[in-house]
Image (cartoon, helix red, strand yellow):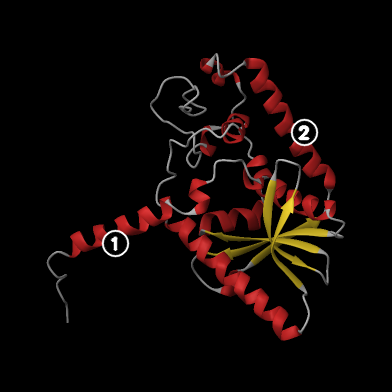
């Protein structure tokens, strides 16, 4: 039997979406302005510089649903591993451990396994992203992020032998979980921090406050990386203090 959609269902759908979008826009991660470990390794130096400078985002990044699912999944996983600690009667897992990577860069490591000295970051990914990591491994952005968390733990005197990404499918089954891992290497974190420092020095040298047109002189990356950039302003003029038209346009 076929049922017709009730009248007004499209209006209700819009109301529901409006509430969800408003809540997502007000979430702490959406309001974050200081650069975090998840952005330091991004291949586009200009994007890193925008985030490091705390420039107000001009690109919402599109549909918030993947981020909402990711946040909810992280919350559930945190409760699960805390419950497992309680069942064990000991703290095998350090859950959502706040780490200080430098005096100005902090972050939260999702999970640390004290039995194997492994820092683990949860990723809840769409099918294409998960397939790419299974095929090619993570890009620099994810790899640098998890190595930075390991670096922060090591600064506290906690032994870190390995870092890992636990990649869960956003749709599908738990059996689709893929774990990528490599030895902890402080040089990866130190190189990324040196790049971040170098971009800051270049920004000061260019005197971007007085010469906003010089944002276009900062190094960019292929346009394929622009879609989720908070500074992406397609169809605009040259990169300036408010945003960037994208690498191809530039």
What residue lies at 65% left-to-right and 65% top-to-bottom? Answer: 178
Residue 11, image x, y percentages: 19, 59
Q: Secondary structure at mark 2?
A: helix
Q: Residue at x 56, y 19 (%)?
A: 209
Percent x, y of residue 162 = 81, 59
Among all residues in the image, which is located at the extreme left?
7
Quadrant housing residue 102: top right
| Residue 137 seen by the camera | no
Comparing 72 with 183, the one in front is 72
Given residues 181 and 112, the one toward you in this image is 112
Identity of the residue furthest to the front in this view: 103
Let me know if residue 238 appears in the view.
yes
Q: Earlier in the sequence, mark 1 or mark 2?
A: 1
Q: In whole angstroms, how far apart are the C-alphas of marks 1 and 2?
A: 45 Å
Label 1, on which residue?
Answer: 16
The label shown at residue 69 is none
195 on left or right of 21: right
Instruction: Report crowding for label 1: few under 14, some 14 to 19, many 20 or more residues within 10 A (C-alpha).
Output: few
Please give the residue where the numbered disc 2 appears in the rendered image: 194
Q: Residue at x 49, y 46 (%)?
A: 31
Q: Residue 114, position in %: x, y? A: 81, 69
Q: How many other residues sit within 10 Å of disc 2, few (<14), some (14-19) or many (≥20)? A: few
Residues at circles 1 and 2 in contact by the CB criterion of under 8 Å: no
Query: In this image, 209 relative to 23: left or right?
Result: right
């Amino acid at each position: 039997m076929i049922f017709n959609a009730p009248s007004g269902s499209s209006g209700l759908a819009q109301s529901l979406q409006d509430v969800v979008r408003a809540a997502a826009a007000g979430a702490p991660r959406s309001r974050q302005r200081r650069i975090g470990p998840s952005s330091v390794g991004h291949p586009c130096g200009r994007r890193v510089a925008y985030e490091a400078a705390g420039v107000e985002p001009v690109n919402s990044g599109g549909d918030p649903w993947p981020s909402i699912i990711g946040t909810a999944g992280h919350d559930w996983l945190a409760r699960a591993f805390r419950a497992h600690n309680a069942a064990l009667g000991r703290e095998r897992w350090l859950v959502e451990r706040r780490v200080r990577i430098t005096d100005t860069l902090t972050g939260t490591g999702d999970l640390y396994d004290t039995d194997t000295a492994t820092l683990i970051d949860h990723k809840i990914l769409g099918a294409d992203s998960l397939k790419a990591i299974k095929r090619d491994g993570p890009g620099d952005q994810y790899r640098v992020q998890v190595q930075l968390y390991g670096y922060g733990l090591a600064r506290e005197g906690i032994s870190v032998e390995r870092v890992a990404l636990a990649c869960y499918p956003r749709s599908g089954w738990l059996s689709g979980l893929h774990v990528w891992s490599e030895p902890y290497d402080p040089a990866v974190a130190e190189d990324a921090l040196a790049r971040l420092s170098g971009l800051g020095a270049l920004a000061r040298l260019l005197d971007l406050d007085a010469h906003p047109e010089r944002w276009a002189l900062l190094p960019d990356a292929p346009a394929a990386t622009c879609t989720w950039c908070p500074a992406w302003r397609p169809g605009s003029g040259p990169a300036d203090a408010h945003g960037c038209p994208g690498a191809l346009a530039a």
